[in-house]
Image (tube, rainbow, N blue to C red):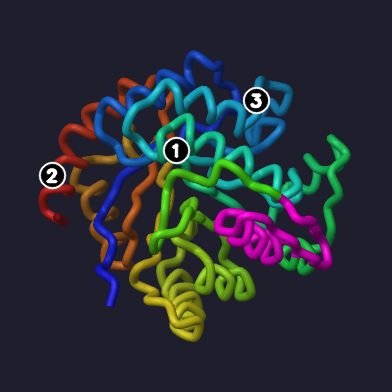
Amino acid sequence: MTQTPGVRFGLRSSQHHRTWDQIRANFTAADEWGLESAWVFDHMIPLSDPRTGPNLEGWTLLAGLAEATQNVLIGTMVTGITYRNPSLLLKEATTVDHISNGRCLLGVGAAWFEGEHQMFGFDFPGPGERVSMFEEALKLFAMLQTQDRTTFEGQYYQVHDAIFEPKPIQQQDGKPHLPVVIGGSRDRMLRIIGRHADWWDNNFSDENEYRERVTKMEAAAEKAGRDPKAIRRSTTLGAEFILDESADTQRRKLESLRELGITDFLFHAPDDIQQLRPFVETMVSKLREEWA
């Protein structure tokens, strides 16, 4: 049986309404303070008003952040499969893996923002078709990373004798492998997560609903012959949780999430990243020691 993953903490620094200098400062702070992961998102426009504000592209941004940091794992939370051909997406992620010396996380999902797709001319199929595209892309990812040449004839994607070099630096079971982080909560996505994900990201307000999701995901993992406890699980708390809640409230909430099986606690960056530092140096430090 695989050992249950240890607890980790991370920063989400979505790029809407932020400049390159601000995002870089957030990531370097996460790196210097010993957080284990740092994330951007993958959208063309802000997800909060005003929608006309600045919003840098996620994967090219991540390449710059790979060079600006030393130790922290970096990724997108998450990339919609509809925005790029999956072969190109994997090539971009592998490039970031090399720039970062093996720190890239491949965050992916089935996409959801219809208005953004309409705005920029991306096709936006129905939800069932998007999930089918996503599942097919996961199969293609696995083949391109491990084969010298790949031929794949899917319903949505085709490659012909494709050469994919260099392979990712990171490995799993002795083979090149970028850790796959999947966001999702509906039944079919939970089954895919159980079969394919190294890391499952899910936000929720109802703990009972989350427990139902976990049961479905773990059943799918077991059916696929995987140890479900080896799949990392993350959720995100807002900046207001750090800025406005008392230490006692923070501890109770984090302890309740840990009891649900959360392994990775992510926090949205406040406008002033230095406001996060006392929380990291006190609460995060104490919980790391207690949960080790």
Tag 3 residue: 55
Percent from the top left, x then y, of residue 202? 49, 58
> Relative to 121, is 63 on the left or the right?
left
Tag 2 residue: 286
Say what amino acid the circle numbered 2 marks: Lys
Between 8 and 16, the one lying in front of the other is 8
Give how far apart the Cα atoms at labels 1 and 2 are: 24 Å
Which of the marked residues, 2 or 3, is nearer the chain's N terminus? 3
Q: Magenta residues, as a range? A: 133-162
Percent from the top left, x then y, of residue 110? 68, 57
Q: Quadrant of residue 273?
A: top left
Answer above or below: position of 12 versus 64.
below
Residue at position x 48%, y 46% in the image: 105
Say what amino acid the circle numbered 3 marks: Asn
Residue at position x 79%, y 48% in the image: 114
Q: Which mark is residue 74?
A: 1
Answer above or below: position of 176 versus 15.
below
What residue occupies the far top of the structure in this picture?
A: 21
Which of the marked residues, 3 or 1, is nearer the chain's N terminus? 3
